[in-house]
Amino acid sequence: MLRKLGELPNHDDSAAEVCRHLRSALLSSRSSGQWQLPPSDIAVRKLLLRSNMVDKISASREQIMHAMRRLAAMNGLPTMKTYNGFLWQLLLTLNRNDPQRRDACDKVW
């Protein structure tokens, strides 16, 4: 979302500049105002371990990202740009038959 709003901080930004970007994005009228924390990656880590795509569940985020890219490519899933993007895509696929699943919805009731 920060990228879409033009508020993505740079690697060399100070803590104050990062806070300014975040505050601007959170208060922006250009967003829906709905924010959520990223989901846990434990289910995907377990899947990657069972599939022998990583050696241990505590593999680094870089190793998990590489394995998620491979798994997505093997299953014809879209290529995502971020760790959380791949995580979301794989969790959506893993949980598609879960009757308690809650999907993103464009309508506000």
Image (cartoon, grey):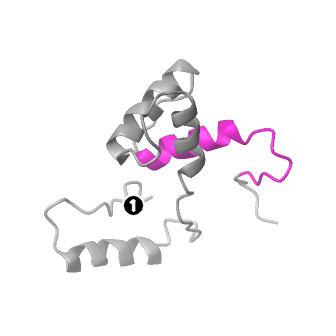
- At x 41%, y 40%, the residue is 64
Q: Position of residue 36 (x, y in %)?
A: 56, 66
- At x 49%, y 40%, the residue is 86
Q: Magenta stretch containing residue 85, yes or no?
A: yes
Question: Which residue is nearer to you in this view: 109 or 89?
Answer: 89
Does 44 sit left or right of 92 as displayed? left
Q: Residue furthest right?
A: 99
Question: Which stretch did the figure color magenta?
Answer: 83-103
Does 86 sit left or right of 61 as displayed? right
Residue for badge 1:
2
Q: Magenta stretch containing residue 91, yes or no?
A: yes
- At x 76%, y 58%, the residue is 107
Tell me if residue 33 comes above or below residue 93 in the rendering.
below
- At x 37%, y 55%, the residue is 3
Which amino acid type is shown beneath numbered disc 1? Leu
The quadrant where residue 33 appears: bottom right
> Where does the N terminus fall, quadrant-wise?
bottom left
Tell me if residue 76 comes above or below residue 5 in the rendering.
above
Q: Residue furthest front?
A: 56
The quadrant where residue 63 appears: top left
